[in-house]
Amino acid sequence: MSDSMNVLLTGGTGFLGEYLLVELLDRGHKVWAHYRSESRKLDTIRFLSGLGLPRSAEALKWFKGGILEADDQWGQWVEEYPGIDEVDTLLHSAASTRLHMDEHGEPLKTNLGSTITLRKLIDRIPLKVHVISTAYVCGLVQGKLVKEVNHPRGDFVNVYEESKWEAEQLWIDKATILRPGIIVGHSETGRCTSFSGYYILFQAAHLLDRLMGDAEGLDRLNLNIDIPANPDGVTNVVPVDYVAKAVVSVMERPECHKKIYHITHPAPPTHEWTLSQVCRRFKVGGLRFAGAGAPFTQPRNRIERMVWRQMQTILLHFANNPVFDRSNTDRAIGDLAVPPVTSSFVDKIVDYGIEKEWGQAGL
């Protein structure tokens, strides 16, 4: 391992941010963790305390402020938080994960805006920089191998991916760019605090299951719905604890800095397998993949309309099928095993999601 790092972490109370904190503290690094919400900070402190972290009072310190004003606020932070100017590494994890633009300009406002202001800050205060992006900055890709390189602007599936691509353009050759796949719950506990992405499939199926419970005369094992997607495509899901371990492992190796890494699963589940898990878990059948571009089965009655609306919700998550190259990642941290995505793991993350009412209950 390299010498101990003194890390400025943005997004420290986020889903991935909490596990980055766990890894950094567990491996003996010092962290200045950014937060915006006092309640989220307290939740994160309780989570860390349950793991016996931090182990010393000096290991973790908190600072509050607007990342979108980081360049302007740095002098104020230095005065208000003695010692923050001793950081030597920036790990930028803060992000908006909204898929579509809202009235406030999110996710572009946060994902690109934070990059612009942090780039200005780094020009004045040289730090080693590591940035969390997403593997899906490649845009819409059907079954082709996506290299660990800077991509030209693609046909993006959503604004989130586009905002991350635009942010990357400002970091190329200046930072280590870490591109996770679709992050899901902890590999052992299923714990999760952000139920988007892959979870949308299971949320939709869970709602459909409840709706069908009140439908008379419905043969739930023969819904007869064709889905216009490729059954052999894959959804690259990775447990949050693996992503955090991989990120920190790369950070600890100076020879690995300023490169691009796909923190992705080498054996991701196919769409066919994922759909089989949805059907198994919620006891439904008659859902079939008809191939990309095939017509969506049109509803003929109220029950079929109900099913059709839910399937429309999850269709987007079967539309993109890139295959991610991991050459840089395997050279750097190939000895770090990626937890397999199995039926028992799916049950674990779905159980947790249902228990927490998909984020509506207290976490």
Image (cartoon, helix red, strand yellow):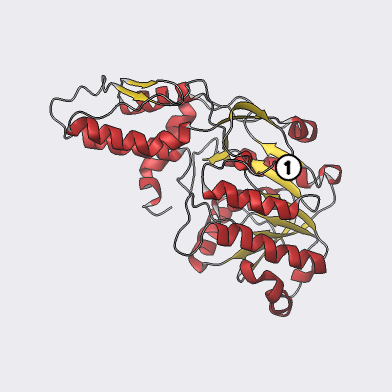
Residue 12 visible in the displayed image: no
Q: Quadrant of the N terminus?
A: top right
Q: Which one is in front, 144 or 178?
A: 144
- Write down the residue under mark 1: 150
* Viewer-closest of 171 and 261: 171
223 displayed left or right of 257: left
Q: Is residue 8 above or below residue 339?
A: below
Q: Is residue 187 left or right of residue 70?
A: left
Visible residue check, residue 31: yes
Q: Give the percent coordinates (x, y) of residue 273.
A: 46, 22
Report the side of 194 relative to 126 (left or right). Answer: left
Seen in the picture, residue 185 relative to 266 is either above or below; the reply is below
Amino acid identity at mark 1: Asn
Task: Say above or below: 192 vs 278.
Answer: below
Q: Residues within 10 Å of mark 1 (few under 14, many from 20)?
A: some
For residue 255, what is the image quadrant?
Answer: top right
Q: Residue at x 81, y 69 (%)?
A: 124
Nearest the eye: 351 or 196:
196
- Look at 44% across and 26% down and name the residue there: 293
Residue 122: image location, x then y, percent: 78, 64
Q: Position of residue 303 (x, y in %)?
A: 20, 31
How many marks on residues? 1
Under circle 1, the secondary element is loop
Residue 45, given in percent of the width and then of the height, sits at 56, 60
Question: For residue 297, which quarter of the picture?
Answer: top left
